[in-house]
């Protein structure tokens, strides 16, 4: 959910006309991009019902009074006392958990959009499933743990913890049913129309059976471990997210019934592609079988002498959040490894079962796993649609987004095509603002580190690493620099959720190469995206820096939208030197010039800027606040925006995921607009812009979302943008994202999200990401002509 990451007319529960009013009912037969069939209209109503359920929950939350000193409400000292929120209504916050489910519903809506290429829609189904898995493993599991330990309290939205849990269950049941129906009724038939099939055993040909029988005997059967349940064999442990077969066996001699469990091997492909015939003229067709179907058809090999009466698939989700004591930082690595081992034994929080499972088998699983009835999800097979990634990976260019190649930033474009630009020379000419994936990561950030590692004048490199790939050239560059005798510091966040094991592996790899590896500050995750290079230039030390919004990961840099600043500005260099000294040593009182650093100054610095716009508006000057983040939950920031709106400041919020702010409420937030954009790339950058008539714009970019964890429990860094051209570029980006001509979702006062994607004639509104791709391609053509 940190994380990789990333609506439609017929599928959108809240379509709108050109005036932004909800359109009830399904799409018309004449509307572009809609089929008008009965199943599709049924699905529209089902999606609308799930969205209505989420809205009802937000409304119920709003009706609950919240204590003035609720656990999640803290008042900034510089803004006064508890009286600062006394004039704000108690129902001003939306529930964060429900807001997240609404975000994932928007992902699901993308899967139903006929204007999106088919394999990309298939990918969105897999993303929805993966997102929801993590939500249950972390958010639901954490809420259950707090309830069990008596630590859970009423949330800022006004809901009691048990109420939140119950409503999550209700909404998740509906969303998962819709998710399954999107696949069964729409994506699967559309794939078949394109010659892409997931075939069930009843559809196998004789040739298929011969091939799969050989495959089972040679590759699947050797790794299977059937586990029986009887007095001598207790009910087996079911690992989290594993897919399993529940098998009912009959002993022909005693006619007694027995239960057995067979785990689907997680290291084998979930979907197996069948070979095409030698004379098949449909070269690009693809037929897949689910591995659990292959196993089910060969159960007699696992239980010889027994009658296989029934078999059903099921899947368990467990609490997989980590709890690590950090008081002894030297042993953090060892403690984390032990906790990773314990993670797989967390208590179950969800049980997914095939919808045809017999009640007595269900009762056995519920009893043995210790789950409640409302934690059981009956779904049509196949379960676990993450496996659709294998289908989405097919090489069918006509069913995918048009290919694109990231371009080198104009300031980093080499004079000769075969040459590589000197990144540090370009930085000496001025700050460089990067916008990934449109600007190439390889020719900018990656090249910066590679050149620094090879440059004999470079004396030191300091780098934060939160998530990166195991084969990352970033890691290779740090190792090369250390082996060349440079001082190399890597601040590694080994607690990056679900990347812990990977981070431990390459942290040790760095240590073996002589890199100084530290694990940040006790009690804080290091989430800041920073790189500092120190170079000897004629006896003078010059510092080169990169401050970004995204991870140093070349793979995700092609999929995530992020911003980064390359600069050799002395103030930024000094700021980073002080911050790295904080992270690796003892420097608790450091002050910064162009940086805001959490947990000390990000919230207070942004609140100061918001209050500046309030003072300007109250004096009769025009002022605005524009914020682009992944999530907006922090109550102090939200309350400050409410006060700004009440003072006449225009407040624009561009959020990808969770938003607890309630815009457009009379007397509270009439001047606040909230938009969300989802698309080909995962919108990941964070931008904060504050304008006051007659004063210079103040704009920051950086790593921090507006959540408690980012502002209180992480090391985050925002850098102030100084160059006028870059300020203008960021202002244009924010204005385009909020424009009524741009396709986006709008958040309504009642907590519902409305999709605005068609103009008055029913034509699609502007796709911001597609426009940016075209703009950067045009820039590349101009550079070639030069």
Image (spheres, helix red, strand yellow):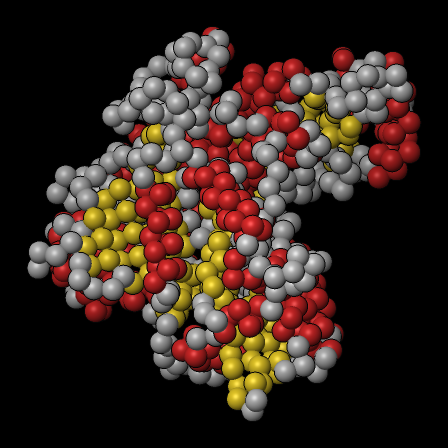
Question: Which quarter of the rendered picture does the C terminus lie within?
Answer: bottom right
Can residue 137 be spotted in the picture?
no
Can residue 311 be spotted in the picture?
yes
Locate residue 678 relative to residue 394 in the image: left or right: left
Residue sticking out furthest to the front: 786
Locate residue 337 relative to residue 81 in the image: left or right: right
Residue 502 is situated, as x and y percent measured from the top left of the image, at 67, 58
> Who's the residue at 70% across and 31% down the image?
394
Q: In this view of the protein, which residue sits in the foreground, 319 or 182?
A: 182
Residue 599 is situated, as x and y percent measured from the top left of the image, at 38, 68
Q: In this view of the protein, which residue sits in the foreground, 419 or 253?
A: 419
- Count of numbered circles in the view: 0
The answer to which quarter of the image holds residue 718 is bottom left
Residue sticking out furthest to the left: 619
Locate residue 434 relative to residue 359 in the image: left or right: left
> Who's the residue at 63% across and 82% down the image?
457
> Who's the residue at 45% across and 32% down the image?
105
Residue 688 is situated, as x and y percent measured from the top left of the image, at 34, 57
- In the rendered view, would you say 44 is above or below 512? above
């Amino acid at each position: 959910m940190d994380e990789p990451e990333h609506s439609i007319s017929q599928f959108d529960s809240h379509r709108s006309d050109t005036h932004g009013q909800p359109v009830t009912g399904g799409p018309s037969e004449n509307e572009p991009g809609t089929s008008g069939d009965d199943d599709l209209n049924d699905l529209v109503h089902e999606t609308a019902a799930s969205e209505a359920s989420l809205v009802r929950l937000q409304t119920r939350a709003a009706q609950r009074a919240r204590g003035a000193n609720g656990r999640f409400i803290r008042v900034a000292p510089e803004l006064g006392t508890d009286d600062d929120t006394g004039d704000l209504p108690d129902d001003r916050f939306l529930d964060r958990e429900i807001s997240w489910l609404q975000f994932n519903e928007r992902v699901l809506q993308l899967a139903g959009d006929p204007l999106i290429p088919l394999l990309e829609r298939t990918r969105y189904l897999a993303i929805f499933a993966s997102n929801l898995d993590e939500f249950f493993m972390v958010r639901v599991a954490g809420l259950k743990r707090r309830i069990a330990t008596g630590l859970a309290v009423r949330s800022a939205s006004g809901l009691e913890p048990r109420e939140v849990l119950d409503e999550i269950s209700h909404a998740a049941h509906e969303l998962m049913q819709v998710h399954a129906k999107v696949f069964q009724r729409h994506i699967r038939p559309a794939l078949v129309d394109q010659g892409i099939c997931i075939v069930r055993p009843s559809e196998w040909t004789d040739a298929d059976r011969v091939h799969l029988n050989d495959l089972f005997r040679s590759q699947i059967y050797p790794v299977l471990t059937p586990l029986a349940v009887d007095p001598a064999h207790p009910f087996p442990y079911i690992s989290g997210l594993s897919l399993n077969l529940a098998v009912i066996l009959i002993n022909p001699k005693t006619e007694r019934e027995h239960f057995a469990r067979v785990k689907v091997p997680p290291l084998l492909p979930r979907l197996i592609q069948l070979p095409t015939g030698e004379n098949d003229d449909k070269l690009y067709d693809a037929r897949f079988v689910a591995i659990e179907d292959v196993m089910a058809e060969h159960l007699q090999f696992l239980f010889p002498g027994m009658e296989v009466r029934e078999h059903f698939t099921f899947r368990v989700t467990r609490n997989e959040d980590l709890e690590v004591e950090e008081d002894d930082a030297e042993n953090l690595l060892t403690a984390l490894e032990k906790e990773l081992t314990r993670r797989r034994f967390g208590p179950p929080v969800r049980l997914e079962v095939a919808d045809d499972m017999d009640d007595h088998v269900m009762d056995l699983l519920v009893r043995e796993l210790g789950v409640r009835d409302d934690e059981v999800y009956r779904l049509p097979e196949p379960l676990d649609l993450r496996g659709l990634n294998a289908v989405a990976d097919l090489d069918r260019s006509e069913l995918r987004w048009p290919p694109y190649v990231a371009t080198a930033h104009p300031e980093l474009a080499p004079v000769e095509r075969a040459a590589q630009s000197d990144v540090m020379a370009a930085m000496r000419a001025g700050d460089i603002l990067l916008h990934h994936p449109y600007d190439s990561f390889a020719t900018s950030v990656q090249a910066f580190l590679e050149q620094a590692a090879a440059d004999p004048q470079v004396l030191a490199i300091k780098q934060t690493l939160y998530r990166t790939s195991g084969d990352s050239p970033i890691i290779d560059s740090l190792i090369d620099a250390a082996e060349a005798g440079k001082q190399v510091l890597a601040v590694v966040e080994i607690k990056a959720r679900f990347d812990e094991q990977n981070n431990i592996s390459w942290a040790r790899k760095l240590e073996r190469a002589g890199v100084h590896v530290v694990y940040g500050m006790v009690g804080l995750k290091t989430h800041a995206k920073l790189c500092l290079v120190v170079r000897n230039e004629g006896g003078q030390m010059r510092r080169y820096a990169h401050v970004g919004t995204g991870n140093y990961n070349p793979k995700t840099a092609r999929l995530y939208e992020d911003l980064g600043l390359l600069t050799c500005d002395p103030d930024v260099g000094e700021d980073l030197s002080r911050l790295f000294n904080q992270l690796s040593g003892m420097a608790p009182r450091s002050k910064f010039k162009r940086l805001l650093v959490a947990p000390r100054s990000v919230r207070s610095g942004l609140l100061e800027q918001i209050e500046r716009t309030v003072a300007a508006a109250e004096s009769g000057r025009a002022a605005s606040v524009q914020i682009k983040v992944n999530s907006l939950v922090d109550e102090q920031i939200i309350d400050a925006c409410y006060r700004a709106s009440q003072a006449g400041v225009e407040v624009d919020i561009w959020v990808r995921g969770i938003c607890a702010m309630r815009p457009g409420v009379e007397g509270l937030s009439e001047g606040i607009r909230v938009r969300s954009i989802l698309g080909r790339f995962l919108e990941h950058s964070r931008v904060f812009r504050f304008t006051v008539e007659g004063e210079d714009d103040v704009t920051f970019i950086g790593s921090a979302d507006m959540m408690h964890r980012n502002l209180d429990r992480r090391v985050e860094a925002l850098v102030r943008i100084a160059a006028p051209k870059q300020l203008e570029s960021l202002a244009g980006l924010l204005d385009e994202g909020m424009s009524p001509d741009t396709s986006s979702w709008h958040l309504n006062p009642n907590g519902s999200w409305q999709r605005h994607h068609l103009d008055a004639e029913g034509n699609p509104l502007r796709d911001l990401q597609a426009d940016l791709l075209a703009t950067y391609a045009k820039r590349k053509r101009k550079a070639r002509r030069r």
